[in-house]
Amino acid sequence: MVISDYINDVADPKTRRAIQAVFENLGGLITDDSIKQKSFDRDYTLEEFESSPVVSLKGTGGAPDYAMTKALAIELRTWAGTLATKLNADAGVTDVDYDAIITASDPTGTAGDENLLVFDDNIFEYHILGTQTITAPVISATGLNIGMDQTDNDGVEITQGILSNSRSAFTVGTSKSFSLKVGITIPDVSGTDDCAIGFRKAEAYQANIDDYADMAAINVISGAIKTETILNGAATTTTDTTDNFADGDSKTLEVNVSATGIVTYKVDGVAPTTTAAFTFDDGEVVVPFVYFLHATDVAGAVTLTKYECGSSDE
C-alpha cells in the first residue's frame, strides 16, 4: 500500500485519520519508497508541510506549566464561563489568566530558545541558533521556510524531540534499521555554513553542530555535499562526496542506519560518489535532526519540502 494513494491525498483530516485507523486495525504495512511502518506507528513520521503550524514556546516544567497550551488557552478564552470554571476546578487551578498564558506561550527568538511547530499530524521542536527577530519558520507555497532572519550565523535546528523516549528516537542494536529523508531547496548555496540532515545522539541541543557527541549527517556547505560524522565526542570527520548542490536546486537528502549501526547516504535516491565508512556504537540512542546556519553570503529562504523518518527496508 502506498501512503500517497491512501492517506496523503485525502483532504479531509477526519477521513484521513479514519483511513489510518482502518490500516492500523488491519495491521497492514504502509509503504512509501524504502520506509515501511505500521500505520500510525509513533516511530513513523511523514510531513509535507502543506498547512501552517501552530507555533509555541516549548514547556520547561513547573507547577502548573502552561507553556504548551497556547492553542487551548485561546479556545478556552472563548468558551462560556461556566465550562471554563468547571475545567479549572477539575484541574485544581483557580483564577487562570488565559491572556497571560497566550503571551507567555509565544515563540521566542533568543539564541538557545526552544519552540514548537504543531502541524495537523506531527509536532516538531526547533532550537534557535543566533538571535532571531523572525521567531518561527513559516509555510510558503513550496514548503516550510526555515530561512528565519536570513542573517550570517543565524539559523535553526529542527527535531522531533531530543530525549531517549522521544518520537523517532532509535536505539542502535535494538531498533530495526531506520532512515531520515528530507526534501530541501536552497536558493543560494554559497550562503550555507551548514545545511545538514541526519541522526545525532539524544542529548541537549548544541549551538555548534560539531559539539554533538555522536552524529552522522549529510551537510551542504557552500554548495559542496559532504558527509560529517562524530563518534564518542571525537573531532568531526568531514568527507567531500564530490557531488554538489547548485543555486535553486531541490534535492532529497537521505541518511540510513542499519540495525547494527552502519550508516549509508543517498542524494535523490542515489549513493554519493564518495563516502566514508561510519558505524554508531551498539546501544547508542539517536534522534533525527535538521540543522541550518547561514553564512556571510546568506542562503535565502531555505525550504523543507518533505520530512520522512521511520524504520526502513535497508
Image (cartoon, rainbow, N blue to C red):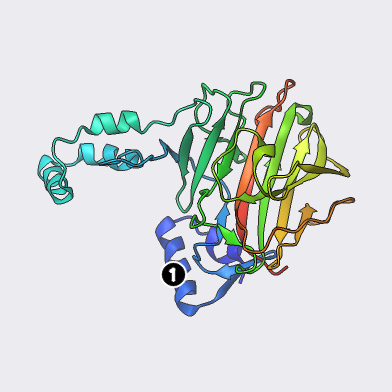
Quarter of the image with the C terminus in it: bottom right
In the rendering, at what x and y percent does residue 26 appear? 48, 79
Q: Report which quarter residue 180 is drawn in.
A: bottom right
In the rendering, at what x and y percent does residue 141 appear? 59, 37
| 161, above or below 111, in the image | below
Q: How many marks?
A: 1
Which secondary structure, mark 1? helix
| 179, above or below 72, in the image | below
In the rendering, at what x and y percent does residue 160 appear? 53, 49
In this rendered view, identify the residue nearer to me: 225 or 110.
Answer: 110
Q: Is residue 255 visible?
A: yes
Whether residue 210 sits left or right of residue 105 in the image: it is right
Identify residue type, mark 1. Answer: Ala
Whether residue 216 sits left or right of residue 159 in the image: it is right
Residue at horizontal 71%, vertical 28%? 299
Q: Assess disc 1: are there few (<14), some (14-19) or many (≥20) residues with their C-alpha within 10 Å of its C-alpha.
A: some
Residue at horizontal 52%, vertical 56%? 164
Q: In the current view of this chain or complex, which residue is farthest to the bottom? A: 26
In the rendering, at what x and y percent does residue 148 appear? 58, 28
Task: Identify residue for label 1.
Answer: 21
